[in-house]
Image: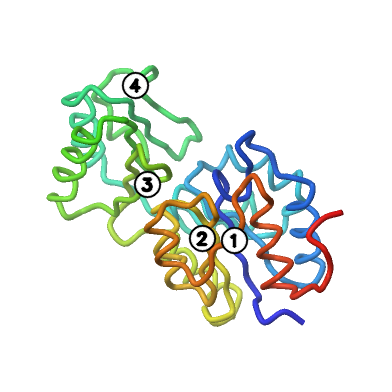
Amino acid sequence: MSTYKLVTLDMDGTTLNDRHEVSEATAYWMKKAMEAGVTVCFSTGRGHREVLSYTEQLGMMNAPMVTVNGGEIWTRPHVLHRRELLDPNTIRNLHKLAMKYDVWFWAYSTNGETYNKSKWLVPADSYAAYHWLKFGYHTEDDEIREAILHEARSWGTLEITNSSPWNLEMNPLGVSKASALRELCAMLGIDISQTVAVGDSLNDIAAIREAGLGVAMGNAQDEVKQAADVVTFSNNEHGVAEVLRKYVLKAEVPLWS
């Protein structure tokens, strides 16, 4: 029987390969873990709608789910447990910052829509008409990204991470995949030492540090690897499957044949 009762999996760069697919090996070991009584769930920066097709594909319809970096926690894919919102004035300031530096940006609302530089609000300043979950920026210009980070951090109201080296992601202060992990433990009645957290980016790092076993993907950012207990294979080499086989199920069989 597994020592670990809960495994939280990031999606992009972790469970999904670079083609945004779940490999056969990964799907196989996820199924084996669930059959063994382990709760396997996604903990992702993606919005709710962007996760559902994968939960259906993988038979995870009774599993909890964490979306928008911990901004939403779901008891099951369609049953909301808790939601943490960004203040509309904060969204206003984040949007102004995006316009100041002329970078790509996006924002998640509870209506399921993703608003971005190409499709913003109508009228453009109607921030208070929506309930906001997360705001993000993308730029490959290191100086601009650092300037945005410096200014946003100075407000003292945001949890700032990334899901790639070229973006920044903003949630309410204190909201993270780690805070969601603690909440899942309370929901499931387990100790955090019985958890595994797997990811590749800075939005995973707090949960990786806090989990009983923190795992970085082989393709993870260096800071994530340094924070992890172990480093597995890359997302294109079935790294999640290897974590489930080796550390969760402790199976003495090949990863895939």
In this view, the mark in front (2 or 4): 2
How far across and how far down the image is residue 58, in percent? 76, 49
Mark 4 or mark 3: whose residue is earlier in sequence: 4
Disc marking residue 172: none
Label 3 crowding class (10 Å Cα cut-off): few <14, some 14-19, many 20+?
A: many
Label 1 crowding class (10 Å Cα cut-off): few <14, some 14-19, many 20+?
A: many
Q: Nearer the viewer, residue 1 or 85?
A: 1
User: What's the distance in space between the residues labelled 3 and 2, CA to CA?
Assistant: 15 Å
Residue under pointer 1: 232
In this view, the mark in front (4 or 3): 3
Q: Is residue 45 above or below residue 20?
A: below
Residue under pointer 2: 216
Residue under pointer 4: 117
Mark 2 or mark 1: whose residue is earlier in sequence: 2
Three-letter code for the amino acid on which mark 2 is drawn:
Ala
Mark 3 or mark 1: whose residue is earlier in sequence: 3
How far across and how far down the image is residue 52, in percent? 65, 42
User: What's the distance in space between the residues labelled 4 and 1, CA to CA?
Assistant: 36 Å
User: What's the distance in space between the residues labelled 2 and 1, CA to CA?
Assistant: 6 Å
User: What's the distance in space between the residues labelled 2 and 4, CA to CA?
Assistant: 32 Å
User: What's the distance in space between the residues labelled 4 and 3, CA to CA?
Assistant: 18 Å
Three-letter code for the amino acid on which mark 3 is drawn:
Asn
Instruction: Find numbered disc 3 in the image and state the secondary structure of the residue it sits on.
Output: loop
Mark 2 or mark 4: whose residue is earlier in sequence: 4
Disc marking residue 162: 3
